[in-house]
Image (cartoon, helix red, strand yellow):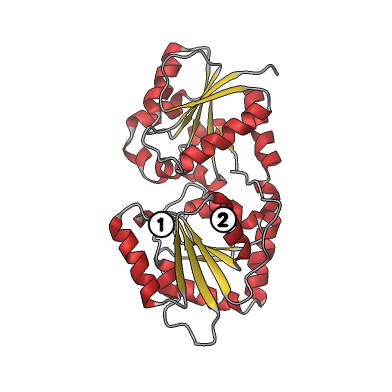
Amino acid sequence: MRGQRIQIVIPAKAPRRSGNRVTAARWRRLLESLGHRVAIDVDYHGERCDVLVALHAHRSAAAALKFRHECPSGRLVVALSGTDLYRDLDRSPRGHEALDAADRIVLLQRHALTRLDRSLHERCRVIHQSVVVPRRLPGKAKRSWQVAVVGHLRPVKDPFLAARAVRDLPAESRIRVVHLGGALEERMRERAEAQMQRQPRRYRWMGNRPHGQVMRQLARSQVLVLSSRMEGGANVVGEAISVGTPVLSTRISGSIGLLGEDYPGFFEPGDVAGLRRLLLDAESEGRFYKSIAAHCCALKPVFQPSHERRAWKQLLVEL
């Protein structure tokens, strides 16, 4: 297949290290490795291109529909994020128009299909977000039983659930939470600092860190805790699994789609006591910990770059 001109449109207000921007940059690298010419923009301005990939149906709907109108022979791909699936599409007629106009719809995990009308399923393709694993990674922490929390301090992430879960643990427990992610509001910064002062042995907030440092902390951790109330398919799940760290996650659609309906490491959103029980059970590194570790290890191939690259190659062939 000859190299094509592909434009990826991302929401205009996406922060520099937002999931949408990170995803778009990764897709550009993968598509360029397949021989295509790829540009990223926040809108469609009438440029000549063979394929337009609109990342976020609701917030990129105008660009998607403009492309469809001005380039009827072009191919339109709409990729759905978490806020699309679990919030915005419920109140976005334009987002639904973009989906109806799309030649293909990209989902980041299989459970997302349950949120879409069955008439769209034939055009949907699941493409898992891949992870490039650094060549050199540290071993697991020795002085503590490290629990990683990765994500900016936003209410939808329920960012302090793990900190609350490790209060008043038995004195013999070695559990310690290491939290990586920026405070986007001053009140969140104050809460994180207050948590550290309240329980310095159990909780450390490291703030926003470069991706390489995040990957090293994930590799050092015995588990990752994902406490979000909503995710489209959190990339950090794949990152943790790729460096050999099993996951404890809220039972939400985005995580069910990545980890499977029968995954034993789920707890209910907001359930402090439930997470505490899972952490203490995991710390013993008995049957429960071995089961989540084995489950996650079996999922590793799904997050390899070659897997994502093949999925995009197949999608473009279909177009």
First of labels 2, 1 by sequence position = 1
Out of 249 and 261, give the one closest to the viewer: 249
- Locate the C terminus by quadrant: top right
Would you name the residue on which mark 2 appears?
Answer: 213
For numbered disc 1, what is the local secondary structure? helix
Percent of width and height locating residue 138: 67, 62
Q: Is residue 128 above or below residue 7?
A: below
Count up the numbered dots.
2
User: Of the numbered discs in the image, which one, if any, rests on residue 282?
Assistant: none
In the image, what residue type sits under mark 2?
Gln
Q: Residues within 10 Å of mark 1 (few under 14, many from 20)?
A: some
Question: Picture quarter containing residue 245?
Answer: bottom right
In the image, residue 240 sits, relative to residue 112, either above or below, namely below
* Residue 146: image location, x then y, percent: 56, 70
| Residue located beneath label 1 in the image | 157
Q: Nearer the viewer, mark 2 or mark 1?
A: 2
Tag 1: residue type?
A: Lys
Q: How far apart are the two marked residues, 2 and 1, measured between alpha carbons?
A: 20 Å
- Out of 94 and 284, give the one closest to the viewer: 284
Whether residue 178 is visible, yes or no, is yes
Q: Left or right of 93: which side holds 117? A: right
Q: Is residue 46 above or below residue 313?
A: above
